[in-house]
Amino acid sequence: MSEIKIFSPATVANVACGFDVLGFCLDSIGDYMVLRKTSERGIKITKIDGFDLPYETEKNVAGVSALALYNDLKPECGFEIEIYKRIKPGSGIGSSAASASGSVYAMNELLGRPYDRTQLTFFAMQGEVLASQCEHADNLAPGIFGGFTLVKSTEPLKILSLPTPSDLFATLIHPQIEIKTADSRAVLPKDIPLERAITQWANVGSLVHALHTSDYQLLKESLNDVVIEPHRKKLIPYFDDVKTNAIKAGALGCAISGSGPSIFALSKGEETANMVEKAMQSVYSKSEIKFETYVSKINIEGIKTVK
Ligand code: HSE
C-alpha cells in the first residue's frame, strides 16, 4: 500500500470532571487526510483544504507528529500529507489532535503497523505540544483508541480504554468564537481546595464505574466539574443558560468540551440528544453569536481508513 485516506474524528476532552485525563470520540464530525509514500525522503505537506494552516512541516501539528514517528523509525521512503480540515481550529473538539493523531495513524498503516496505539499517541503528543504548549493526550487517545479513554499517566504514557454504554449520545454546540487552549489554561488556578479535589476525584471514579456498568443514573450524578468549569465558563457567553436548558431537556450532564468554546452534553438515547440540541440552539438563537450544533453517537472505532 502506498497511499491511504483516513477519517480522523473530533473528540471531547475532559468529559466534565476528568480534566486532562478523560475523553471520548465523536462520529459525525472530523477531518480527512491522505498520506502517500514517496521515494524522496522526508515529510511534505502538499495540500491543506478548509482552513489557513502552515505548510511548513515543523510548524504544522500533523507535520510535527509525523516527524516524531519518522525520525524514530527512519524508513527508507518519505511521505506527502494532504489535510482536508473540517474541524475548526480553536473549537474545543480536538482540531489539532485530529491532525496530530491522523498523520501518525496513517503513516503507521502505510508502514505495516510497526507501532501500537500507545506509541502512536506518544508521537501525536509531540504535535499537540505545538498547538497547546503543553503535553496532554486526552484529545489524542480517544481518536487513536476509539470510545472513552483515560490517560492514566503521560510519563510513562499509559492509556486505558473504557467501555461505552450502547445508548449514549453526545450533543455539541459550537459558538463561533475562538478560545485558544493556551489562554483557557492560563485562567486556571495553580492550587485547588482539598474539598473540591475530593468531590472531583469521587466524580471521576464514579464516572468510570458508570461507564463499566452502563449505569446512566450514576453517569448523571458524576458528570460534574467543580474544579475547572467555574473558571473557564466565564470565557463562554451563555454557558450557564445552555447547561440549564440541556439538563431540562433531559441531558445526563452538560459541560465545556475540552478547553472550549464548544459545550457538550451526554444523553441516553438519540431522541433525547436531539431534544437537547434544540434546547441548546434556543439559547444562542437569541444572541448575535453564530453557532453550529451536532448530535453524534460515541465512535468506538476511532480513526479509520476510508475509500
Ligand atoms: N485537557 C485539555 C484542556 C484539552 O482542557 O486544556 C484541550 O486541549
Image (cartoon, helix red, strand yellow):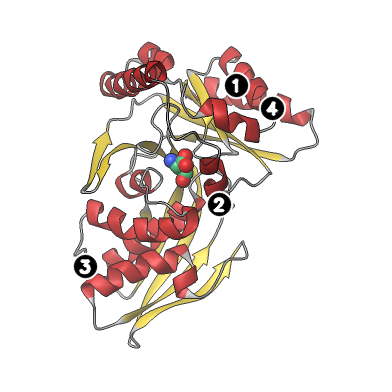
- Mark 2 is on which residue type? Ile
Task: Reply above or below: 179 against 115.
Answer: above
Classify residue 127 by image quadrant. bottom left
Residue at (54, 14) in percent of width and height = 250
- Mark 4 is on which residue type? Tyr
Mark 1 neighbour class, 10 Å CA radius: few under 14, some 14 to 19, many 20 or more: many
Task: Pick whichever of labels 4 and 3 is earlier in the sequence.
Answer: 3
Classify residue 15 by image quadrant. top left
Task: Reply above or below: 144 against 83.
Answer: above
Q: Quadrant of the C terminus?
A: bottom left
- Mark 3 is on which residue type? Gly
Task: State the image coordinates of residue 163 (x, y, percent, origin top left).
Answer: 28, 30
Foreground pick, 227 / 108: 227
- Answer left or right for 268 relative to 123: right
- Answer left or right for 150 relative to 293: left
Pointer 2: what residue?
87
C-beta proximity under 8 Å, tags 1 and 4: no
Task: Pick whichever of labels 3 and 2 is earlier in the sequence.
Answer: 2
Pointer 3: what residue?
112
In three-dimensional space, the C-alpha distance between marks 1 and 3, rounded to whole angstroms, equals 45 Å
Mark 4 neighbour class, 10 Å CA radius: few under 14, some 14 to 19, many 20 or more: some
Residue at (33, 46) in percent of width and height = 141
Residue at (24, 52) in percent of width and height = 117
Q: Which mark is residue 243?
A: 1
Question: Under 8 Å from ligand 1: the CB of mark 1?
Answer: no
Question: Under 8 Å from ligand 1: the CB of mark 4?
Answer: no
Q: Which mark is residue 238?
A: 4
- Regarding residue 306, the answer to whether it shows in the image is no
